[in-house]
Image (spheres, rainbow, N blue to C red):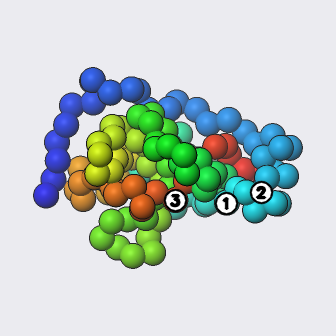
Amino acid sequence: MPVNISLEAFPSPPSQLRKSHPTDVVLWLLRLRRRFRIVGESMQPLLVAGTEVLIDPLAYRQGRPSPGDLVVAYHPHRPGLRLIKWVVYVEAQGCFLRGLNAAASTDSREFGLVPWERIVGQVVCRFP
């Protein structure tokens, strides 16, 4: 069920993602961060295929993603497939995720809200 929304009322997508700091590497070594490799073109120009990022899997234990966050989530209809997307808006049942390159993205416009339990974590930086 395709969803078409105007993005004018929502926060702008991120235009940059910081590089990792030594602290990020230590947290990764302690398994408090996870690596994720970008596949595909849905997050261009911010993230191109082959780029690696670090994810904080504990970021949303006490709260929920906010509009503007970058997150990794499991696809709601394809078990095991992880997606990296931009949080456009949140509702009680989940969040609306979108790729930065709309023409190359499979996102909430096609599959609707992503339930909270499908969110893997917040993208915190590029890696290394």
Asked whether disc 1 touches disc 2, contact meaning CB atoms under 8 Å apart, the reply is yes
User: Neighbour class for label 3 at 10 Å: few (<14), some, many (≥20)?
Assistant: many
From this viewpoint, is residue 109 visible? yes
Asked whether disc 2 touches disc 3, contact meaning CB atoms under 8 Å apart, the reply is no
**Residue 123 vs residue 31, the one in the foreground:** 31
Q: Which mark is residue 28?
A: 2
**Residue 61 vs residue 22, the one in the foreground:** 61
Question: What whole-number distance in Å separates the C-alpha atoms at marks 1 and 2?
Answer: 8 Å
Nearer to us of marks 1 and 2 is 2
Outermost residue, left side: 1
* Residue depicted at x 29% and y 42%: 91
Outermost residue, bottom side: 79
**Residue 8 vs residue 115, the one in the foreground:** 115
Which residue position is annotated with label 1? 35
Which residue position is annotated with label 3? 120
**Which amino acid does the dot numbered 1 rest on?**
Arg
